[in-house]
Structures are given as structure tokens and as C-alpha cells.
Image (cartoon, rainbow, N blue to C red):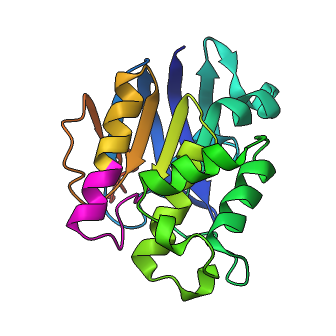
Amino acid sequence: MTLEVKELGCKRGGREVFAGLDFQLSPGELLVVTGPNGSGKSSLLRMLAGFLRPTAGSITWDGEPVLEDREAHGGRSAYVGHLDAVKPVMTVEENLEFWSQFEGALVGEGRVRAALERVDLVPQTDLPAGFLSAGQKRRLNLARLVARPAALWLLDEPTSALDDKSSQIVATMIEEHCQEGGMAIAATHLDLGIDAQRSLDIDAYRPRVQLEVVS
């Protein structure tokens, strides 16, 4: 398994956000993407998930363009955005079951329970998700990574709203995923507490405006 990005470009609202972005990711590797707000971190993750089409360049999985078979790419990748997709009237358990099935996984009670244990949400299993704190909602979103395994994790600000203990749980999840041969890409402005094998400052790929000097 190899994820390869070549000469990737992104435009939003007619504005060129980044251009010429290149990297390659192999099993067992974590790539941490940094950059200021508006530099394109979230857009990059959505492109890697197959939700957005790049304006230039290519994204391939073992040499095959990911956009040619979005269903296959969706099965091997898991995207967790920076906004928590939690349905407030459903219980914590029902939320996890819903999203896992929505993403194509047939999850049993044992896997859901294991995912909730992993993110320390078992006491809240039957609680309507609308009563959760911001940190608990974040952990519920991240529990989807355990309930529906995937080779590639795409994480947008995974430790946002989390305290130190919960951040360590997430760091351990990412480390174990990579140790087991998975791949992960995390866009963040926070220290994840992990020694990442790879890093990318997306701001370095922002087009620079050239000002013409008139003499």
C-alpha cells in the first residue's frame, strides 16, 4: 500500500490555496500536516478522502487514481473532520452504530463496545449524545476509527477540545494503528505527543504574490 500525491493544487472560491504539493506515505507512517488557518489543511484531507477534486495534480493508491473508484477508496480510508458529526437525540451507542453502518461497516455489539471502551465512553453508552461535553463528542467521533477499521486515517484536528488524558488516548490509538501497518495523516496546530515519521508545512506550498515594481 502506498499513497502518493503529486503536484497537487487546490482552489477555493477562485483563490489558489496551495500548489505543487508532493508527498508519499507507506504502511506504518504518520504524516503531520501543519499550517495557519486558511492554508488548506482541511481541504487537503477532503481531497485525500475523495470528497473534493483537486484543481491540479494527482492522488494515487498503489498507482491507481483514487477518484476512479471512490467506493474502494472509501472502504480503505476513514475521515474524521474537525466538526463533530453527532446526532443529539440518538444515544452514544446509536450514534456509533449509525456512522459505522453509514460508512459501510457491519458492526456487532462487541465491536461497538470495544470502540467505546477505547475512548473511555462506556458510562455514557445510553446517554443521548446531546448531553455530551465537547471533548466527549470528539471522542465519540474518533471511536468510529475503532468500530470501522481502515488502512488510512485522515484526521482533522483530532485532539481539539480534548484534555491531556483524552489527547493521550488518541495519541496511543494513532501509534498503535501505525505499528500495526496502518497509515495516518493528521492536520493539526497542536502537539499530538507523537514522534511523527513525516511532517509537512502546507504553508510552504502557498502561491506567493509577486508584486511588480514600477520605476
On screen, residue 162 versus residue 17, left or right, reads left
The residue at 34%/61% (across/down) is 159
The residue at 37%/67% (across/down) is 37
Q: Is residue 76 above or below residue 165?
A: above
Q: Which residues are magenta?
A: 156-170
Report if residue 214 is visible in the image.
Answer: no
**Residue 204, picture quadrant:** top left
The residue at 79%/40% (across/down) is 106
On screen, residue 84 versus residue 39, left or right, reads right
Q: Is residue 172 above or below residue 75?
A: below
Residue 145 in the image, given as x and y percentages of width and height: 54, 45
Residue 179 in the image, given as x and y percentages of width and height: 34, 23
The single residue placed furthest to the bottom in the displayed view is 131
Report if residue 135 is visible in the image.
Answer: yes
- Judge by depth and name the residue closer to the eye, 27 or 214: 27
Residue 159 belongs to the span the image colors magenta: yes
Q: Is residue 65 above or below residue 166?
A: above
Residue 17 belongs to the span the image colors magenta: no
Residue 45 in the image, given as x and y percentages of width and height: 53, 47
Residue 68 in the image, given as x and y percentages of width and height: 80, 26
Q: Is residue 179 above or below residue 95?
A: above
- Quarter of the image with the C terminus in it: bottom left
